[in-house]
Structure formats: structure tokens, C-alpha cells
């Protein structure tokens, strides 16, 4: 194909604009994800202050840690090229989830400590197995597909776990689904949908598309419940055993 100077200039400009939009969306996704990562801090401050985990559960943070580790691995050059912002957001997320889990173990009773420690060991064992299989047994293209499907499954399971939605419907209260937390989840997912679409990476935009839809559902549910209730939304707590 022959290019004249104006056409080439226009093509380069369009490519640069697409590149800028892509990374702008990825950086926005990282920022919104950070809001989600720090949202449990009030709960863990309470645990430290009271010196007890009370009836709180650490299971969501264990599962989130595994999800972050898998998605971080997908974003690294060992597996995928050009999706570094997936690696950055999930590496930060993994640090937060690991820190929350460590605090929980420090203040849990002996039975809980043993259970959570075993789950944590299982997470690292599974992740280590994924890394070994993908590096030792697969070439780069097959590795990306293998880890990509695992990341999609992990993200879909995380997004599709409607624990807070069930609590809101059952209690008719938005205490466990604060507005800004739900909004951040929606904006994070939407940002990574744009990032994935611009990169042409279905392993990014498909699960985040599901997360975007569920984020919209949460916001609509919040508006519906909030309309019929006068209570103020509180800071998020860990979901307790029911």
C-alpha cells in the first residue's frame, strides 16, 4: 500500500491518539482500583483497635489475592506484551490483600489462624503451579491463552459473587454497599473495558465488561434501596458469617 505524506501523518496521529486513550484508560482503571483496595482499611483499623477479628471473614481477601496474582501474571511480559497496566494494578492489589490477610492472622484466634494460614498457603501453591506450568510446558502464545482463560475465570467468579447484593436485598440496607465503593468498581471495570478494547485483548475487556454490567446493577439497586430508606451509607466492613 502506497502512503502519501498527509495520509501517513494522519495515520500516525490516529495511532498516537489511540495509544494515548488506551493508556489513559489503563491509568484511570489503576486509580479507581486503588479506591477499592483501600476501602477495607476502616475494618482492619477496627480489628487492630479491638485486638480481635470478631465475626469477620478473611475469605474474600484470600480469593482476591489469588485473583490479583493470576491477573498480575497475565500482565507481565513473560505471558503478555503491552498490558503492563494490568500487572501494575494487580501487583498493588496483591500487596493490599496480603497485608489484610496478615493483619487478620495476627489478631485471629488459633482456629481461625490455622484455617486462614492454610488457605494462604494453598493460594501460593496454586499460583506457583500456574507459573510452573505456563513457563515449563507452554510456549509464549499458548501461555498467554492458558493464563488468559484463568484470569477471565477468576475475574468472572469475583465479579459474579453477589455477596453484598444479597445482603442489601435481605436487609434492605445499603450499609454493605456504599455508593462510592460501587461507583469505583463500575468506573474501574469500565476503564479496563476501554483499555482492553483498544488493545484488542478479549481476556481484559470480556470479564471487565461483566464487571461493568454488575456495577451498573449495584448502582441501580443502591438508588432503589436508598430511595426507600433514610439511613446514611456507612464505611464498608468485611462481610460477616451469616
Image (tube, helix red, strand yellow):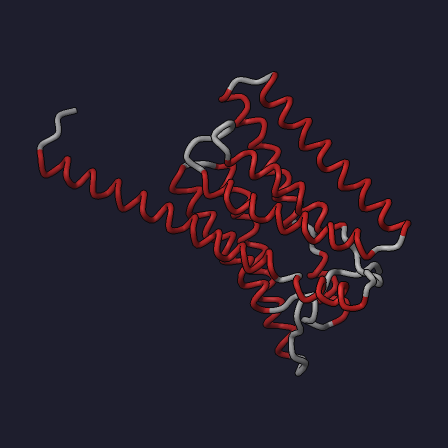
Q: Residue furthest right?
A: 111
Taking the image as shown, residue 142 lies to the left or right of residue 119, namely: left
Vertical side of 222 occupied by 117: above or below: above
Quadrant holding the N terminus: top left
Q: Residue furthest bottom?
A: 230
Vertical side of 185 occupied by 204: above or below: above
Please provide percent x and percent y for residue 202. Answer: 48, 37
Please provide percent x and percent y for residue 24. Answer: 37, 51
Quadrant holding the C terminus: bottom right
Residue at image position (58%, 58%) is: 36
Looking at the picture, tell me which residue is in the foreground, 167 or 151.
151
Q: Residue furthest left?
A: 5
| Quarter of the figure with residue 199 | top left
Please provide percent x and percent y for residue 28. Answer: 44, 54
Residue at image position (62%, 39%) is: 69
Vertical side of 165 occupied by 159: above or below: above
Looking at the picture, tell me which residue is in the foreground, 30 or 150.
30
Looking at the picture, tell me which residue is in the foreground, 95 or 202.
95
Please provide percent x and percent y for residue 160. Answer: 66, 49
Residue at image position (84%, 61%) is: 55
Residue at image position (62%, 27%) is: 131
Vertical side of 225 occupied by 165: above or below: above
Amino acid at each position: 500500500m502506497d502512503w502519501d505524506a498527509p495520509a501517513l501523518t494522519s495515520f500516525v496521529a490516529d495511532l498516537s491518539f489511540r495509544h494515548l486513550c488506551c493508556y489513559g484508560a489503563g491509568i484511570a482503571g489503576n486509580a479507581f482500583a486503588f479506591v477499592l483496595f483501600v476501602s477495607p482499611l476502616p475494618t482492619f483499623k477496627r480489628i487492630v483497635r479491638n485486638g480481635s477479628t470478631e465475626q469477620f471473614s478473611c475469605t474474600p481477601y484470600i480469593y482476591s489475592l489469588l485473583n490479583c496474582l493470576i491477573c498480575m501474571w497475565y500482565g507481565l511480559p513473560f505471558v503478555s506484551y503491552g498490558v503492563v497496566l494490568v500487572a501494575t494494578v494487580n501487583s498493588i492489589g496483591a500487596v493490599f490483600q496480603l497485608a489484610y490477610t496478615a493483619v487478620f492472622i495476627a489478631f485471629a484466634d488459633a482456629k481461625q489462624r490455622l484455617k486462614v494460614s492454610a488457605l494462604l498457603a494453598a493460594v501460593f501453591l496454586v499460583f506457583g503451579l500456574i507459573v510452573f506450568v505456563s513457563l515449563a510446558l507452554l510456549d509464549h502464545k499458548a501461555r498467554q491463552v492458558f493464563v488468559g482463560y484463568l484470569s477471565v475465570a477468576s475475574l468472572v467468579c469475583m465479579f459474579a459473587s453477589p455477596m453484598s447484593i444479597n445482603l442489601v436485598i435481605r436487609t434492605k440496607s445499603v450499609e454493605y454497599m456504599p455508593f462510592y465503593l460501587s461507583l469505583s468498581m463500575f468506573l474501574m471495570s469500565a476503564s479496563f473495558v476501554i483499555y482492553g478494547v483498544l488493545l484488542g485483548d478479549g481476556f481484559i475487556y470480556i470479564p471487565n465488561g461483566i464487571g461493568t454490567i454488575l456495577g451498573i446493577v449495584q448502582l441501580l439497586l443502591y438508588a432503589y434501596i436508598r430511595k426507600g430508606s433514610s439511613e446514611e451509607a456507612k464505611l464498608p466492613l468485611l462481610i460477616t458469617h451469616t
